Image (cartoon, rainbow, N blue to C red):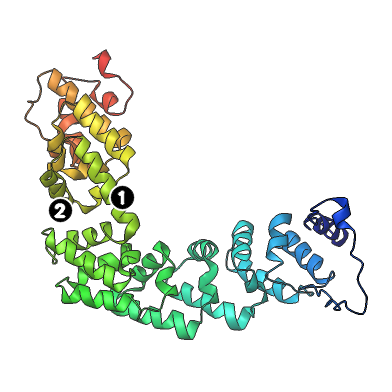
Amino acid sequence: MDYLSISSALSFYRKPAQLKGTLAELKPPLVSLQDETPLKPIVPKTTSKQRPFTVTYLINSCGLSLESAISVSDKVQFQSPERPDSVLTLLRNYGFSKTQISNLIRKRPMLLLSHPENTLLPKLEFFQSIGLSSNELARTLSSDPTLLTRSLENQIMPTYDFLKSVLLSDEKIVAALKRTTWVFLEDPSKNLMPNVTYLRESGVPQSCVSLLLTHFPEAVMQKHEPFVETVREVKEMGFDPKKSTFVLAVHALSGKGNKSIWERCYEVYKRWGWSNDDILSAFRKHPHSMMLSEKKIMKSMGYFVNEMGWASRAIAECPVVLFFSLEKRIIPRCSVFQVLLSKGLIKEGFSLTTVLLPVEKRFLERFVMRYQEEVPELLSVYQGKVKLEGL
C-alpha cells in the first residue's frame, strides 16, 4: 500500500462535523470584530507527512490492517524506517513469525523505537539463557510483550533471583513464566515474597510451595490479605499443610474467578444428590474437582449414573474419575466391563477405581487380553469398532 492511498484512506477516518439546529440558527451572529477573541490555531499531533508514512510502514512491514495501523499510529510515529527495521530484523532472527510480530507491535507499538542491541537484545538473550526455546520465547512475548518494556537490571533480574531462591531451577521458572508473564512484571516484594513467607510460616514444605508457584503462580500473586484469608480457610476445611492437596486447594479458592467456579461446582454436585460432606470430602481428595466445567461434570456424572448404574455419591469417593476423558477412557473401559459382566466373566463387585485408574497397559492385560479366547471381539469393543448391541 503506497503513501497516496494511505493519505486518501486517512481522510475517510475523520469524523464529520455534527450539524445541530435550524439553518437560521447556523447563521453567524453579527458581532464586532474588535470584541472577538482570537482563536488559537489547532496544531495536529503529527504532520500529514509523518502519519501516512507510519501507517504505510505498519501495514507493509508489520502486517497490520489499515484500521489497526491508523489506531497504532496515534501511539507511535516515525519518519525513517531505520530503527523499526532493525527491531523487526532482531525479532525475525529470534524466530518471531509475521503474525507474532503483528501481535507484538499492535500491543506495544513503542517497541519499534527501542534500541535493538542495547534494550531488546539483552532481554531476549537472558530469557533464552534460562531455558526458553525460540518458539516459546516468541509465543510468550507476542502474547504479552509488556515484558520487553521492563528494565532488565531493575525488574527482570531481581525477580529471577527471587524465583530461583524458591524454585531452585530454571526449568521451573520457565514453567511459571509460560503460565503467566505477570510473575516477572510485578515487584516480587509487593505480594509474592510475603505470600511465600506466609506459606512457609503456615507449615507448607518447600516442595509444595514450589509446586504452587511453578504451576499456579497467579495464586501466589494474589494481594497479601486475601491470600492469607484463603490459606486460613483451607486450614479450617481440614487440609494438611504438609500435603500437596493443601496448595492445590489454595489455588482452587484463590481469587474471585476461582471462588465463583468453586461455588458453581458446589451447586452442580448438589443437583446430583451430593451432601455438603460429600462435596468437602471430594474436595479434600482432589481439590481441582471444584474447578471442572459444569458441562464436564454433567456429562461424566450422567454416564456413570444413567448408563453404568453407579450410585452418584460413589463418585465423591473417587473424584479423580471426573477428570478422565469420556470418549478416550471412560466409555471404552466401561464398555469392556459391561461385556465381561454380561457374559459372567467378572462379578459386579468391581469398583470404579479398579476399572478406570490403572494405566492402559495394565488395564488391557487384566481385562482385555486375559479374555481374548472367550470374547475375541473384546479388543474391538475397547477400540470402539464393535458396538455392545452386536455381542
User: Looking at the picture, does residue 111 appear above or below residue 363?
Assistant: below
Where is residue 352, by image quadrant? Answer: top left
Identified at 21% across, 69% down, the residue is: 207
Residue 261's mark? 1
Q: Which residue is mark 2?
A: 284
**Secondary structure beneath disc 1?**
helix
Image position, residue 48 (x, y; %): 84, 69
Image position, residue 347 (x, y; %): 7, 25
State yes or no: discs 1 and 2 in contact (Cβ < 8 Å).
no
Q: Earlier in the sequence, mark 1 or mark 2?
A: 1
Q: In which quadrant will I find the C terminus?
A: top left
Query: So how many labels did they put on this image?
Result: 2
Amino acid under label 2?
Arg
Q: Nearer the viewer, mark 1 or mark 2?
A: 1
Q: Is residue 331 left or right of residue 123?
A: left
Q: Is residue 119 left or right of residue 296?
A: right
Image position, residue 33 (x, y; %): 93, 76
Identified at 37% across, 66% down, the residue is: 176
Image position, residue 197 (x, y; %): 23, 78
Amino acid under label 1?
Ile
Q: Residue furthest top?
A: 390
Residue 121 in view, yes or no? yes
Q: Residues within 10 Å of mark 2 (few under 14, many from 20)?
A: many
Q: Residues within 10 Å of mark 1 (few under 14, many from 20)?
A: some
User: Looking at the picture, does residue 44 appear above or below residue 266?
Assistant: below
**Secondary structure beneath disc 2?**
helix
Identified at 10% across, 59% down, the residue is: 238
Q: Nearer the viewer, residue 317 or 380?
A: 317
